Structure formats: structure tokens, C-alpha cells
Amino acid sequence: MSLNPFRADPAIAARCERQTAEIGDRVSAEIMRLIATKARRPEDNLGSIVLAGEAQILRQSFGLGSVEELMLLALAPARGIARPPISNFFVGAVGLERETGNLILGGNVEFPGTHLGFTVHGEGFVFTRAAARGTSIETIAIGEAHPCAHCRQYISEFATSRKLTLIDPLGHRLTMPQLYPWPFDPDYLGERGAVAGAYDATLELAGHDLPVAIADRLLDAGRRAHSPYSKCPGAVVLALNDGQLVSGFSIESVAFNPSMGPLQAAMINLIAHGYETADIAEAALGTRLGGNVDYSLSVTELLGRIAPRAPLNIAGWA
């Protein structure tokens, strides 16, 4: 067991334990109901979201003193979003959007039959989901305010990460500078990091035969990708059996690994909106064909495992 150099507040831990015992199940059920009302509506981009107004009503209804108390109770339903068939280790994470006050729930995702590098961590789910919504994370609740080194590096890619607060049911309230005091961050390469809502309007698709709706969504996702190091953005659109579209885009890390691939990001949004891999009818990839980073092989591999019957159309950026 690693040594914990940080002191927790026992009063917070005791309050969280009491609230979990007294109202935890009811709060979880209400959060799950709120999330279910937004499922399978990716056009709203509200999957796995508890809106700020809904959070306020929950706080009032259950006598909670702060949104952080609600976030800690929301960890239980967040674990229900996790998909860890390899480890059977369920991780939940709850992020507070800085711009809206909404809560984003997420969990870890594993992909059997392929390499472990495709794994999505709970913290990565929340931060990638926020990027898809054009927002940033102010506070994140996790089971222990002790994200792995992979997550600390990934979180450090986001421009506002030095202002991030991490909380847990044990009573810790920590900051990223405490957890990662001397980070290898985008500043080392003269970059500002991933910025909420960033958009590269200069990116264009080369010749393709994609349907207009898929091509438009693919281009929009590619323009939102964070790829300052390779200059090779990646984007994926998943066309679903009910006619809906879900997309995702790559988010590079200054350390290269961890970086979030476009299909992993699309899977985060797929799961957040209440879909499963069986709902995928076909997929489209936008990538820098022959570039220093070309997602063709990695996306083909992962899609072949999660949706082997779904055809993949690959288009290049102009």
C-alpha cells in the first residue's frame, strides 16, 4: 500500500458516511432517473449530465449543504456507467463543469480482446466528455483523490487543470499542484493545452463518398480535436441503428502517451448517451492519411473488437 502524505478531514468523511447510509440509495435512484430522461438523445449532448438546476433541486430535497456533498453521493450511480469487463474494478467519477454548474458522471471503460492501452479511466471519461461539450472541469469527485499517474498526466493537458480541485468520501480536498507539483505540461513545448471550445475552422475533408450528415459531423469533430504536437487530428462518427450519430475526437498529451484516440472518445459519448456497442451500425474515421499519426490501423483494430459487423469508412483531411 502506498503512503498517503495528505490529511483528510474526518468531519467530511463522517458526514459522507452518514449521508450515504441515510439517503444514498434515494439520491442514486433520483440521479439515475434524471440521466435516463436524457438517454438516447445525442443531439442534445446531455448524456450522463445532471443539470445545475436539477442538482440544486436535489440538494434542497435531500438537505445537502453543498454541491460537493451531492457529487460524493453521485459516485455510486457514476460507477454504474463504468464498463470494466476485464478487471471487474468499477470506478466512478463526477465532474463539476466550470461554465455551467452541471455535473458530468463517468466511469472506466475496458475493451476485451485488444490491448490495455485502449482503456479509458474514470477521470479521463469525465474530462473527455467535458471537451465534447465545450466545457472544462472545476472540481472532480473520485473514490480517492488519488488519480493514477496516467490520469494526472492526461488531466495536465487541459489548460485549466492547475485550478482543478479533487475531492473524495474520505475527506480529502486537494489541488492538482499538490498531487502533481512539477508537471510535464504543454508549457514545456510552448503550447497552452486543451482549451474548452477550441475550433480549427481551417481543417477540411479531402474527396470522399460519405453521406452529408456523417461528413458534416466528422468535419466538426475533427475541427475540435486537440492535436498541437502531431498536427494530425482524428475524428470518429458512429452511426447508430436508430439513425442517431455520436462522434468523438482525439485529444493529444504533451507526453504522447496518454492521449485519447477518436474512437475511445466516441465510445465515451456513446456510453454517456445510454447506448451499447451493439447499437453501432457503421463508423467513419477522419485522419491524416500517411501522417505522423494516422488512426486508420488503431481504429480498425478497436472497432473490429467492439462492433465487428460495423463497416468503417476512412476519409483523409485535405
Image (cartoon, rainbow, N blue to C red):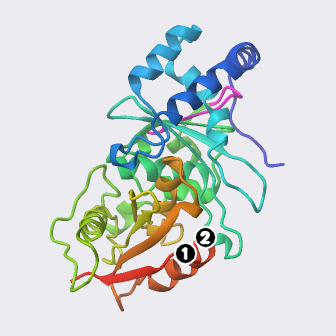
Question: Could you give the CA–CA distance between mark 1 and mark 2, rounded to whole angstroms?
Answer: 5 Å
**Marks 1 and 2 in Cβ contact (< 8 Å):** yes
Position of residue 277 in the picture relative to residue 288 (left or right): right
Q: Amino acid at mark 2?
A: Ile
**Residue at 38% in and 87% down:** 292
Pick out the residue farthest to the right: 1
In which quadrant of the rendered view does residue 5 lie?
Answer: top right
Q: Nearer the viewer, residue 3 or 283?
A: 283
- The region drawn magenta spans 164-172
In which quadrant of the rendered view does residue 94 lie?
Answer: top right
Tell me the residue that label 2 is attached to. Answer: 306
**Residue at 35% in and 69% down:** 189
**Residue at 62% in and 21% down:** 27
Q: Amino acid at mark 1?
A: Leu
In the picture, which quadrant includes the C terminus? Answer: bottom left
Q: Nearer the viewer, residue 309 or 56?
A: 309
Tell me the residue that label 1 is attached to. Answer: 303
Dot 2: element: helix
Percent across and percent down for residue 171 are 67, 25
**Residue at 53% in and 47% down:** 274
